[in-house]
Image (cartoon, rainbow, N blue to C red):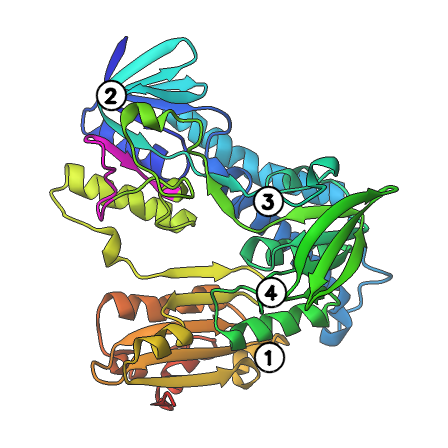
């Protein structure tokens, strides 16, 4: 049995960074990876999808070239083999860089294979058993495959297998109208696919405010994406070379016939084959590892970081998990999960940047609040670039003057949101941002202007 100071299972965003910190502190580390170094973000998530979205945006903008007085000469074409090759060329150095950095890290031994607990301090990889007093689980998550009648009889795609496509599906049917589904839907529509999105909830991106969801839906509909909300998929079946999706809406059934089917209805943690019972690690009903405010499990000496702990499903939350654990273990800095503010983006075009509470959550809290909104068509930078879709809104606690939430849908919203987020972290009143002088012409310069027009949330 090989003994280590720490074992890290999984090499997503949290694992490699933690390995470097621990090794730098003189710990003897074992890192276990069963498949692709870098986890979801590098291989099937952020890096490849945003690379694809960039190619789709180039195609979209090229088709609009005449609006800018630019002649491109003939119809705009998409070479999906070249698109995929570009995506692969972006992903490969990231994945190989993670692997190379771990294998060359002094004090770190890398084991390639599936790691399973065989005791509270023991992990088996292939035929070898490793032991350590401290074990960190960073195994990520994967796409949910729902129990839809007939699904086992038809081919389907997930966010992972979408990375292998080097052609444009004639008609892509997307089950799920949230972040993953909508990003793929818009990208492949711009590549040339006919696209239908089927969503069970009353509106897209169910966690967002209805006005935000409606605006996103309108943007997608303008690109001729077929949006079906309040729609339950009750069966799928092969129909020749196509796939027939039977949908029920308000008691009425209909069919959508597509060439390819993408499942994008959620994620599930990769915890069902870890032997967690052997270590006494508790999970919730969905399989997420239960952790406290400093990411410790109920089992002494075992932590869970990243998507598998259910405390965030983003690369940035996984990275922050690493920071929290490292700060507590090495820096005598008692950082906590509850200190962070909810923040994320939807990378449709235009993007949605989110921070803090939604308007619905603010209303539900019952606190006196102020709200300010602005249409993107009133933002000069957006008007100049010909990208005026969307709107922005900010919510403020009336009594404390603290910003409690923001939803920015529009040009550069994924970047602009940070000027709001940073003020929220500083716990500064909105007047600090209101009185700031921002650069013209930018989207950010209109945030102070918006805050001059705060009005009671009725």
- Crowdedness of circle 4 by 10 Å Cα count: few (<14), some, many (20+)? many
- Left or right: where does residue 328 sit relative to residue 152? left
Q: Residue at x 78, y 44 (%)?
A: 237
Q: Secondary structure at mark 3?
A: loop
Q: Residue at x 40, y 43 (%)?
A: 285
Q: Residue at x 62, y 42 (%)?
A: 158
Q: Quadrant of residue 232?
A: bottom right
Q: Identify the residue under disc 3.
A: 146
- Left or right: where does residue 92 sit relative to residue 194? left
Mark 3 or mark 1: which is in front? Answer: 3
Mark 4 or mark 1: which is in front? Answer: 4
Q: CA distance from mark 4 to mark 2?
A: 47 Å
Magenta span dominant secondary structure:
loop
**CB-based contact (under 8 Å), mark 4 and mark 1:** no
Residue 102 % position (x, y): 37, 26
Q: Which mark is residue 384?
A: 1
Mark 2 or mark 1: which is in front? Answer: 2
- Crowdedness of circle 1 by 10 Å Cα count: few (<14), some, many (20+)? few
Q: Quadrant of residue 383?
A: bottom right
Q: Is residue 83 above or below residue 430?
A: above
Region rendered in magenta: 292-306
Mark 4 or mark 2: which is in front? Answer: 2
Q: Of callouts 3 and 4, which one flags the residue occurring earlier in the amino acid sequence?
A: 3
Q: Identify the residue under disc 4.
A: 349
Q: Identify the residue under disc 2.
A: 121
């Amino acid at each position: 049995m090989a003994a280590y100071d720490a074992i890290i299972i999984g090499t997503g965003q949290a694992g490699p960074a933690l390995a470097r910190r621990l090794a730098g502190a003189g710990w003897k580390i074992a890192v276990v990876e069963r498949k692709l170094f870098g986890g979801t973000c590098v291989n099937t998530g952020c890096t490849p999808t945003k690379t694809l979205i960039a190619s789709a945006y180039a195609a979209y903008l090229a088709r609009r070239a005449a609006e800018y007085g630019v002649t491109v000469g003939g119809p705009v074409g998409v070479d999906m083999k070249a698109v995929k090759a570009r995506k692969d060329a972006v992903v490969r150095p990231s994945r190989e860089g993670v692997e190379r950095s771990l294998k060359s890290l002094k004090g770190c031994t890398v084991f390639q294979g599936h790691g399973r607990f065989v005791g509270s301090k023991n992990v088996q990889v292939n035929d070898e058993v490793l032991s350590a007093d401290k074990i960190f689980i960073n195994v990520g998550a994967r796409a949910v495959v729902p129990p839809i009648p007939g699904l086992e009889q038809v081919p389907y795609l997930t966010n992972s297998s979408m990375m292998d496509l080097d052609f444009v599906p004639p008609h892509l049917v997307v089950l799920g109208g949230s972040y993953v589904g909508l990003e793929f839907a818009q990208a492949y529509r711009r590549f040339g696919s006919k696209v239908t999105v089927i969503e069970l909830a009353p509106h897209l991106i169910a966690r967002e405010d209805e006005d935000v969801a409606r605006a996103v839906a309108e943007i997608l509909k303008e690109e001729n994406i077929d949006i079906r909300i309040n729609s339950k998929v009750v069966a799928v079946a092969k129909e020749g070379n196509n796939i027939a999706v039977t949908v029920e809406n308000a008691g009425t059934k209909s069919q959508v016939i597509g060439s390819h089917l993408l499942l994008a209805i959620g994620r599930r943690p990769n915890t069902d084959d870890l032997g967690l019972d052997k270590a006494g690690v508790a999970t919730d009903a969905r399989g997420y590892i239960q952790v406290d405010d400093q990411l410790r499990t109920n089992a002494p000496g075992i932590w869970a970081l990243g998507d598998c702990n259910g405390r965030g499903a983003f690369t940035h939350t996984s990275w922050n998990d690493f920071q929290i654990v490292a700060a507590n273990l090495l820096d005598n800095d008692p950082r906590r999960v509850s200190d962070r503010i909810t923040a994320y983006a939807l990378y449709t075009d235009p993007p949605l940047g989110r921070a803090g509470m939604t308007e619905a959550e603010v209303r539900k809290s019952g606190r006196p609040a102020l709200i300010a909104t602005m249409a993107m068509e009133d933002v000069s930078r957006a008007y100049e670039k010909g990208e005026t879709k969307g709107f922005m809104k900010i919510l403020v606690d009336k009594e404390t003057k603290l910003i409690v939430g923001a939803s920015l849908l529009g040009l550069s919203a994924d970047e602009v949101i940070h000027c709001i987020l940073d003020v929220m972290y500083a716990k500064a009143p909105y007047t600090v941002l209101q009185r700031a002088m921002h650069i013209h012409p930018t989207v950010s310069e209109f945030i102070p202007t918006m805050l001059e027009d705060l009005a009671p949330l009725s």
